[in-house]
Amino acid sequence: MNSGGQGIYLWFLARELARMGHDVHVFVGPPYPDPMPFARVERLPNQQFWAKWVLDQTDQIIPEHNPFQVLGPLNFYELAASRIGFLPEPFAFSVRAFRQLARHLRAGERFDIVHDVQCLGYGLLGMQALGLPVVTTVHHPLTVDRRASFIRDETLEDAIGTMKFYPIGMQAFVARRLDCVFTSSEASARQIVQDFGVRPERLRNVRNGLDTEFFSPSADVERSESNLLCVGRSTDPNKGIRTLIHALSRLPAHLTLTLVDDDSPDNQVRQWAREVGVLDRLKLTGRVSSDELVRLYREAVAVVVPSRYEGFGLPAVEAMACGAPVVATRAGALIEVMQLTGGGVLAERDDADSIAAGVRTLLENREARALMAKHGRERVVERLSWPGVAAAIAEIYAEMVEARRRGRPTTMMTSASVGN
């Protein structure tokens, strides 16, 4: 999906809820998800001013067909905020969604619950004021991304830009006031409590789901004996790609690495590979389709997830669902995912030698590697398939709706505990 993990979560959760018989109404802003014929989808457009500033498309900021459109209150706010370095879209989208929801209610339509996917704009509090229970999914708090951005920053100006960009104050304020916060791991739950100040009893740990029919092994695809796979952006320090490149230099020369990442000539990963002498062993794929991604998982001898932090670790789960063993770092939720599935080995975070040792452990024992791949696939299907995850979420919806109907504060429900 163009919007990454949040878009994938939205699409599959909506599909499973629809399959269960629920009516799903989706408000979504750009970048829009793939077609969702199982739901009623309303697109809430914006002018994408922030992207135009970043991409130096200033000639496109004022629309030729209707130049006065930018003077609308929300449009003008987005234009001004993005010009000085703020990310305005979470707030503006939440207000647009609130206004659209209010229109539907005035027209006599009925909704039972609102589920936000990590927008956490102030407009959600308006939805609560309309009498609806409002829940949100936070895969990890935005503070994690801000810390990663500080690592990238090279100048004081860069650091000031990071401070301005992330709407952490708004998101934390809203998260503390919603009826329930879903997250996907105990590591993320602890981070949300620490960084956003959300009370633990408001949190529900419902792990992310996976389409295990689509992400699956295939007897028709021959698995390589020498090609490693990693899915991650080198521009995100949390993905640990530079450490992986150093780990590759410590592995036998016949091993290669396929990296699903931007393949433009200026990708810094090429320089990292050149510095340690493995540029000829590195292949960058660029953006790939879902079908191509599955093929890559099915072909890889092992998948490496060298992250410094993960709120869940979707590439590790996708790989195991496709029958590939995984080498993952002891970072964030990856520890929980690997313990849950038994589909690979753990290595130390930020440690190229440890990652290389993990890869060698898998490659040197074909029988153990096959057993890990088998266990990983079975346990992902058993515990992380979307039907079970969506059913668990729907049960919590019912609790929230009943608590709101009876006028009880949802924060007093004793079943709302981290890890439950």
Image (cartoon, rainbow, N blue to C red):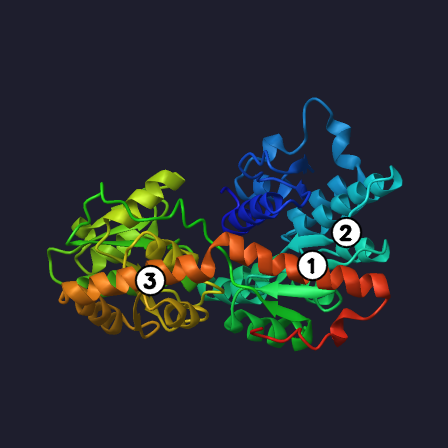
Task: Mark 2 and mark 1 in contact? Answer it, CB < 8 Å.
Answer: yes
Disc 1 residue type?
Tyr
Q: Residue at x 60, y 37 (%)?
A: 38
Q: Which numbered tag is attached to residue 112?
A: 2
Q: Secondary structure at mark 1?
A: helix
Residue 276 horizontal/vertical position (percent): 20, 61
Q: Secondary structure at mark 2?
A: loop
Q: Secondary structure at mark 3?
A: helix
Q: Residue at x 60, y 31 (%)?
A: 59
Disc 2 residue type?
Asp
Residue 93 horizontal/vertical position (percent): 70, 46
Q: Earlier in the sequence, mark 1 or mark 3?
A: 3
> What residue is disc 1 on?
397
Residue 251 horizontal/vertical position (percent): 16, 64
Say few, some or many: other residues with alpha carbon within 10 Å of mark 1 (under 14 / 14 to 19 / 20 or more): many
Q: Which numbered tag is attached to residue 229?
A: none
Mark 1–mark 3 distance (CA, rounded to whole Å): 30 Å
Q: Residue at x 64, y 70 (%)?
A: 203
Disc 3 residue type?
Gly
Q: In the figure, residue 336 lies in which quadrant?
A: bottom left
> What residue is disc 3 on?
376
Q: Is residue 219 above or below residue 193?
A: above
**Can residue 51 be seen from the camera position used here?**
yes
Say few, some or many: other residues with alpha carbon within 10 Å of mark 2 (under 14 / 14 to 19 / 20 or more): some
